Amino acid sequence: MTHIVFDAYPGYDGVDCNPICNRPIVVTFQGKSVEVTVTDDCVACGNNELQLSPAAFEQLAAESEGLIDVSWSWAN
């Protein structure tokens, strides 16, 4: 999860475990979706970017596509 969202999440004090950790999100790209779990922040990520595991990425697109413009939402 981008550090911008991660660090601003309500209840996070910058020291203890962030309440966002272990929350599931649904990531979507061109009609394909994958549910993933937030594990930590991504300092190199921009405003709404995510860093996906290779396995999650491959469910959305071929690795050869490189960066893809995904959308995400909290899983129910």
Image: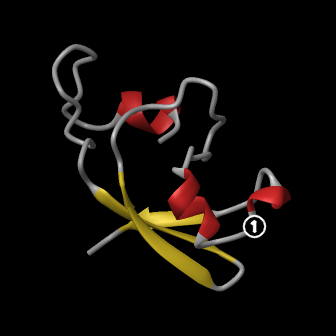
**Residue occupying image coordinates x 58% and y 72%:** 59
Q: How many marks?
A: 1
Instruction: Kindly identify which residue carries mark 1.
Output: 62
As displayed, is residue 22 above or below residue 71? above
Q: Of 75 and 62, which appears nearest the observer?
A: 62
Residue 29, image x, y percentages: 66, 73
Q: Position of residue 55 (x, y in %)?
A: 52, 60
Which type of secondary structure does the marked residue at label 1 adopt? loop
Q: Position of residue 2 (x, y in %)?
A: 52, 37
Which amino acid type is shown beneath numbered disc 1? Ala
The residue sitting at 61% across, 82% down in the picture is: 32
Q: Quadrant of residue 41?
A: top left
Can you say whether 28 is above or below 17 in the image? below
Residue 48 placement, left or right of 53: right
Q: Is residue 18 above or below residue 43?
A: below
The residue sitting at 64% across, 72% down in the picture is: 60
Is 25 placed left or right of 23 in the picture?
right
> Looking at the image, which is closer to me, 60 or 18?
60
Q: Is residue 17 left or right of residue 59?
A: left
Report the residue that reaches farthest toward the bottom.
Answer: 31
- Of 43 and 57, nearer the camera is 57
Residue at 22 percent across and 19 percent down: it is 13
What is the crowding at mark 1: few (fewer than 14 residues within 10 Å), some, or many (at least 20)?
A: few
Where does the C terminus fall, quadrant-wise?
Answer: bottom left
Name the residue furthest top: 15
